[in-house]
Amino acid sequence: MFLGYRVVSLACLLIVPPVAAQTSHGSESDKAHAGLVDAMKQDLRRLVKAEDAFLARQGTYTGVLPQEEFATRPERRVIVVAQGDKGYSATLTTTEELGLTCGLYDGIGVAPSPVISSARKPACWHTLPSGALVAD
């Protein structure tokens, strides 16, 4: 009986294609997407530093920092909702890949997406036609 089980298991392994053959991971588009997500997260990290510097100088956060202070490309647009000196939330979109959004929050700012796990830590997502969010 044990031998039969091993043969069946081996047959199943031979029939199922390797995971690499089932996915497109490693393709040029996947690498470009991953690079864009990393770059957008880096832009948001620069935003955190810029907001911290503004808070140190002015005693409050702002939602009107010039894009040049943190965004590396003009195709990226950020919306910051400041809560005075208590915190802020930010979302970053791009025309480089439609539907891709990144965001973060700090202090009492509200996380702009449930995929964001903690304050000051950027996360990215896509919104599907069904309205569901998919983390990137």
Image: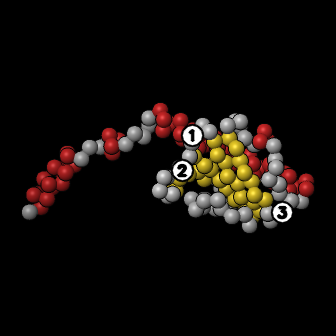
Q: Residue at x 50, y 58 (%)?
A: 132
Q: Are marks 3 and 1 in contact (CB under 8 Å)?
A: no
The amino acid on which the numbered mark 1 sits, given as a three-letter code, is Glu
Mark 2 or 1 closer to N-term? 1
Q: Residue at x 74, y 54 (%)?
A: 80
Instruction: Find numbered disc 3 in the image and state the secondary structure of the residue it sits on.
Output: loop
The amino acid on which the numbered mark 3 sits, given as a three-letter code, is Gly
- Judge by depth and name the residue closer to the eye, 23 or 127: 127
As measured in the structure, the alpha-carbon distance from the residue carrying label 3 to the one carrying label 2 is 29 Å
Evaluate whether residue 53 shows in this view: yes
As measured in the structure, the alpha-carbon distance from the residue carrying label 2 to the one carrying label 1 is 10 Å
Residue that mark 3 sits on: 84
As measured in the structure, the alpha-carbon distance from the residue carrying label 3 to the one carrying label 1 is 32 Å
**How many numbered discs?**
3
Q: Residue at x 77, y 42 (%)?
A: 67
Image coordinates of residue 88 in percent, x first then y, are 75, 60
- Judge by depth and name the residue closer to the eye, 6 or 15: 15
| Coloring applied to the structure | secondary structure
Image coordinates of residue 63 in percent, x first then y, are 80, 53
The amino acid on which the numbered mark 2 sits, given as a three-letter code, is His
Image coordinates of residue 27 in percent, x first then y, are 44, 35
Image coordinates of residue 110 in percent, x first then y, are 69, 64
Mark 3 or 1 closer to N-term? 3
What is the residue that sits farthest to the front in this orientation? 129
Residue that mark 2 sits on: 126
In the rendered image, which quarter is residue 121 located in? bottom right
Mark 3 or 2 closer to N-term? 3
Instruction: Find numbered disc 2 in the image and state the secondary structure of the residue it sits on.
Output: strand
Q: Are marks 2 and 1 in contact (CB under 8 Å)?
A: no
Neighbor class of circle 3 (other Cα within 10 Å; few <14, some 14-19, many 20+) is some
In the picture, the disc for residue 97 is 1
**113 on left or right of 71:** left
